[in-house]
């Protein structure tokens, strides 16, 4: 076996150009396979992590959509909760908010602006300033985004400058950058400050209705919306609807599926063409090496030895192609990630699948040429020069 | 060692070999002579279990391998026989060491024994230091030594050589024949095809083929004309 693998490497190495061209199809095919699986895996992971809770059984979500964009005060109230809990089939109701930030009026010298603001996350990578968290000992410490800093302070350095937020003076201790795919508010304050000054701003506009085990989620949702339209406290200010968190993912999944089918088609076609190429190159190899086959047969190689030697060669060729394909796949995934709203990830099993696919291509398309090599009559082979 | 009775072979209407009877005892050094196209290679291919498509009976070590599986035939070729082919038949892309190693790949020889065995036969045919050379970097005589080394690396009981000196000058031919003589003296049976009278002198016995028929005595060869 090891001998045969060595022989395979040797003879592949002898025709590098020819074999590399043959491998190209496999490289492209496998890179596509890696990319498809990475996007699929990344998507699934994002969905289960981010929206997985929505998919919980026995729960309906009602959301309030304010009719005016500026309105941040109307939403769902404790009275609404009581109304909802009277709907038949409802077990209990919890309020939640889809808004992640509050809004605040800020001022520096004569410049005024209205921006979103939130409590700082546990860790934040600062672009300017020290540390990754807000120093809690001083309530006036805040971080602001690079975007806000350039808007307000233009060329000046914003670090350690005062900023008035809703009449209170804060000091800018850090500046962070906001990426296109990751929403962040323009200002982070410490947790305590947020609680004291801004938490009441975050209106609760989502009601999670926990349904009794024997109740139908759909009917409960419908009835709940009807009830809210009649009795909802802020019914004048906006509308209520059953929010279907699967909706977003559904359209997205559909789009993703089309892309996946397309890439899978590309992968399939290039693997098929690659396979035919492998078959062709193996036929050439076999007829080029008739003399060698004859010699090996005369010195003890069985026809099985010959068959397996060429099969191994075909598999080694495809697996080398597969490995290069995996590397290219990683590069492809990196490129794709620059355009995706979530992160495509290459998992161990997709590597395993890629290698299995390459091996299979080698075995399937190497089989007939290898058989031909194994079954050539010996006397004829020994006449070859 | 081997015995063939009434062996014949034809390609369609053309009878390449007819009615061949020959017995080779163990330890013999036999030369087969005959003009080009007379069927010498055809005969030794049958003797070497390379060609199973013949009529008549062939016993190697008292065994008939006519209906033996391909796998077993390969084993026997690998373990008991050693071939030196017309025109060397070396693998041009492999070096001397790798060429000689070929039979060991298919016999269950362990890696460290392989090295030892290849080095042994390289020494034996006088090619020490040439392990890494390619056949194209060697003279005809050296290439033939490689072919002989490859034939004997598995310590075969029978060496079958087709024109081992065909492409060599007289001096080199002599050196090659000295190697054969030594192998024969060490107990190896040798069957050698040649059309060189002088080379045939090294053998204990010479038989003749003409038009597919075997003659045991030179004076019988032209009897039928
Ligand atoms: N596959 C074949 N089909 C038809 N005829 C063949 C075939 N192989 C060999 N022959 C014929 O068989 C005869 C014997 O060939 P063989 O190779 O045994 O000759 P030879 O004695 O070894 O000659 P040389 O000294 O030139 O090597 C030749 O006349 C050749 O034309
Ligand atoms: Mg011949």
Image (cartoon, rainbow, N blue to C red):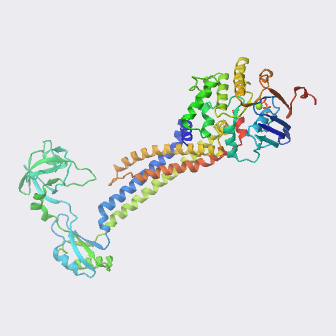
Q: Residue at x 54, y 50 (%)?
A: A361
Rendered-image quadrant of the C terminus of chain B:
top right
Q: Quadrant of ligand 2?
A: top right
Taking A362 as reference, is B94 above or below it?
Answer: above
Q: Quadrant of residue A199?
A: bottom left
In screen coordinates, is A283 left or right of A335? right
Q: Is residue A152 left or right of residue B114?
A: left
Judging depth in this view, the residue of A103 and A81 nearest the camera is: A81
Residue B181's x, y, as percent?
A: 72, 24
The residue lying at 90 percent from left, 26 percent from top is B219
x, y percent for residue A230 = 22, 80
Can you see residue B34?
Answer: no
Residue A151 coordinates in the image, percent (x, y): 16, 48
Q: Considering depth in this image, is A176 or B117 the residue closer to the camera?
A: B117
Picture quadrant where residue B125 is located: top right
Can residue A261 be seen? Answer: yes
* Numbered marks: total: 0
- Horizontally, residue A309 falls left or right of residue A222, namely right
User: From the image, which quarter does the N terminus of chain B lie in?
Assistant: top right
Q: Residue furthest top?
A: B171
Residue B35 lies, with reference to residue A19, above or below; the image says above
In the rendered view, tell whether residue A383 sits above or below residue A248.
Answer: above
Residue B147 drawn at (x, y percent): 66, 29
């Amino acid at each position: 076996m090891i001998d045969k693998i060595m022989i395979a490497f040797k003879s592949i190495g002898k025709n590098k150009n020819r074999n590399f061209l043959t491998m190209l199809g496999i490289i492209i095919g496998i890179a596509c396979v890696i990319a498809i699986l990475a996007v699929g895996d990344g998507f699934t992971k994002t969905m289960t992590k981010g929206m997985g809770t929505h998919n919980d059984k026995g729960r309906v979500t009602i959301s309030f959509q304010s009719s005016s964009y500026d309105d941040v005060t109307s939403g769902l109230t404790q009275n609404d909760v009581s109304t909802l809990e009277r709907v038949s089939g409802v077990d209990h109701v919890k309020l939640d908010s889809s808004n992640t930030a509050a809004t605040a009026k800020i001022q520096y010298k004569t410049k005024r602006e209205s921006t979103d603001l939130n409590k700082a996350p546990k860790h934040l990578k600062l672009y300017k300033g020290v540390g990754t968290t807000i120093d809690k000992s001083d309530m006036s410490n805040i971080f602001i985004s690079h975007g806000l800093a350039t808007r307000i302070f233009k060329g000046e350095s914003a670090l350690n400058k005062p900023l008035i937020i809703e009449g209170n003076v804060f000091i800018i201790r850090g500046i962070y950058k906001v990426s296109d795919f990751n929403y962040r508010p323009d200002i982070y304050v410490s947790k305590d400050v947020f609680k004291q000054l801004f938490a009441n701003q975050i209106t609760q506009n989502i009601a999670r209705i926990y349904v009794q085990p024997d109740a139908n989620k759909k009917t409960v949702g419908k009835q709940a919306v009807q009830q809210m339209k009649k009795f909802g406290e802020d019914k004048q200010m906006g509308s209520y609807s059953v929010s279907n968190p699967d909706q977003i993912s559904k359209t997205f999944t559909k789009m993703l599926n089309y892309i996946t089918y397309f890439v899978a088609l590309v992968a399939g076609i290039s693997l098929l063409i690659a396979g035919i190429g492998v078959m062709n190159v193996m036929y050439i190899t076999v007829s080029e090496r008739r003399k060698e086959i004859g010699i090996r047969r005369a010195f003890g190689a069985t026809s099985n030895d010959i068959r397996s030697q060429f099969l191994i060669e075909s598999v080694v060729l495809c697996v080398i192609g597969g490995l290069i394909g995996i590397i290219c796949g990683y590069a492809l995934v990196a490129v794709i990630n620059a355009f995706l709203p979530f992160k495509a990830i290459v998992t161990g099993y997709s590597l395993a699948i890629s290698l299995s696919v390459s091996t299979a291509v080698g075995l399937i398309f190497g089989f007939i040429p290898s058989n031909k090599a194994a079954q050539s009559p010996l006397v004829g082979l020994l006449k070859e020069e | 060692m081997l015995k063939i009775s009434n062996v014949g072979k034809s390609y369609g209407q053309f009878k390449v070999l007819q009615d061949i009877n020959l017995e080779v005892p163990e330890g013999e050094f036999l030369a087969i002579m005959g003009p080009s196209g007379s069927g010498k290679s055809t005969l030794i291919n049958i003797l070497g279990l390379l060609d199973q498509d013949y009529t008549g009976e062939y016993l190697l070590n008292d065994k008939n391998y006519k209906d033996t599986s391909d796998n077993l035939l390969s084993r026997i070729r690998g373990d008991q026989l050693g071939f030196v082919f017309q025109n060397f038949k070396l693998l041009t892309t492999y070096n001397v060491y790798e060429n000689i190693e070929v039979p060991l790949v298919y016999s269950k020889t362990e890696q460290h024994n392989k090295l030892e065995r290849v080095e042994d036969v390289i020494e034996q045919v006088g090619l020490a230091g040439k392990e890494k050379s390619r056949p194209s970097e060697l003279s005809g005589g050296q290439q033939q030594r490689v072919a002989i080394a490859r034939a004997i690396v598995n310590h075969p009981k029978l060496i079958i050589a087709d024109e081992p000196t065909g492409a060599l000058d007289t001096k080199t031919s002599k050196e090659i024949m000295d190697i054969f003589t030594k192998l024969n003296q060490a107990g190896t049976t040798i069957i050698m095809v040649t059309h060189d009278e002088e080379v045939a002198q090294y053998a204990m016995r010479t038989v003749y083929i003409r038009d597919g028929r075997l003659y045991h005595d030179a004076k019988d060869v032209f009897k039928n004309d």
